Every structure is written in structure tokens, then in C-alpha cells.
Image (cartoon, rainbow, N blue to C red):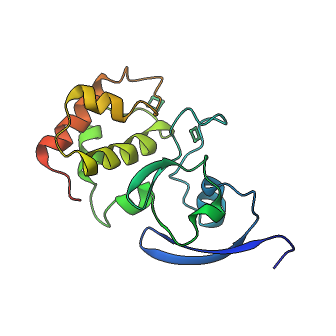
Amino acid sequence: MATGTRTITVTVDSVEYTDPVEPRMLLVQYLREVLGKTGTAIGCDTTNCGACTVLFDGYGIKSCTMLAVEADGHEITTIEGLTPDEGLHPLQESFNACHGLQCGFCTPGMIMQSASLLAENPHPSDTEIRAGLEGNLCRCTGYQNIVAAVRTAAEEGVPR
Ligand code: FES
Ligand code: FES
């Protein structure tokens, strides 16, 4: 192990990994560069966009704002883990059906934060959906279709 590295053990998408990491490595870098979980995107360097959102012990967090060493002993779910082996997650279905997506940068983060929101509040109002997604930016859809997608998934029921 290189000098200064720390060994972490994390569960990502139901698989346990043990890896040496530099203390300065961000969680998003660990997910993308070490584990190859490139569905988690990097859309800014200012903690503004939410493209890097993953579930951390079930709660949506921005993985560019956390160090990999802080994830030691915790459970992470990425967009790859949310996606079933066959077909799509209900949120992926509703984003598709409601045209809540155009690009691959914001969409994974939007869906992960929506999953976090619906786990806490299975039947949010449109105002609550907007508040729940306020940390996730999209420059394309005007948010109307994203809100509709989350509302539709909530109405159809999202597995917890
Ligand atoms: Fe994390 Fe933008 S890449 S908030
Ligand atoms: Fe990705 Fe708008 S669809 S930024």
C-alpha cells in the first residue's frame, strides 16, 4: 500500500469492496475510477449540479462532496444498482414516459435524488418534489417534465 493511503470497505450496489484509497480521493472518483460506476456523473466542481447523487445508507448525497474514506463501512447505491437486471426501475420508466430527461449528466442524479425523496415521502406534492430536487440542476427540460415523472412514479408506487 502506498504511503498515506487508507483501506476502506464499502458496499456498493450490494457488493462489498475493500480498496486502498488516498485520503483526498472523493467518493465520486472512487465510484467512477476505481469501481467503474460511470453512471454517476460529474457535472460541476462546485457542489451545485447534483449529477453525482448516490444513495448513502439510503439517503441521497452528492458524492463529489464526500471523501471516499468517509464512506468506509457504509452502503452506497448508484444508478447501476438501482437499475434491475432486466427492464427499468419505475423512476426510469416514468422519466422516459414523461420526457423528464434529455442527457446522461443530470438524469442519473435526478433519479437517485427522486428515489431518496420517495423513500422518505412516498406521496409528495409538486411543491415537495421541487423542494426535494432543488439541489439537482437541469438546463434542458424546464423541470416540468421531471416533476411530472416523479409524480407519476409516486402514483404508480416505487418499491422501497
Ligand atoms: Fe457533484 Fe456537481 S458533480 S454536485
Ligand atoms: Fe441533463 Fe437537462 S437533461 S441537463
Query: In this rendering, would 22 be left or right of 125?
Result: right
Question: Residue 72 in the image: x percent, y percent?
Answer: 58, 70
What is the tally of numbered marks visible in this picture?
0
Q: Residue furthest right?
A: 3
Which quadrant of the figure has residue 9?
bottom right
Image quadrant in which you'd find residue 44: top right
Q: Position of residue 129 (x, y in %)?
A: 28, 32
| Vertical comparison of 32 with 137: above or below | below
Q: Quadrant of residue 109?
A: top left
Residue 66 percent across, percent down from the top left: 61, 52
Q: Is residue 24 above or below residue 152?
A: below
Which quadrant, please, contains the N terminus? bottom right
Q: Residue furthest top?
A: 142
Q: In this image, 5 relative to 43: left or right?
A: right
Q: Residue at x 28, y 39 (%)?
A: 96
Q: Give the camera-side residue of 136 and 145.
A: 136
Q: Residue at x 38, y 44 (%)?
A: 113
Residue in the image at 38% along x and 23% along y: 141
Q: Position of 21 compared to 152: left or right?
A: right
Q: Is residue 44 above or below residue 142?
A: below
Instruction: Using the image as rendered, state which of residue 61 and residue 77 is in the foreground.
Output: 61
Q: Is residue 55 visible?
A: yes
Quarter containing ligand 1?
top right
Residue 98 visible in rendering: no
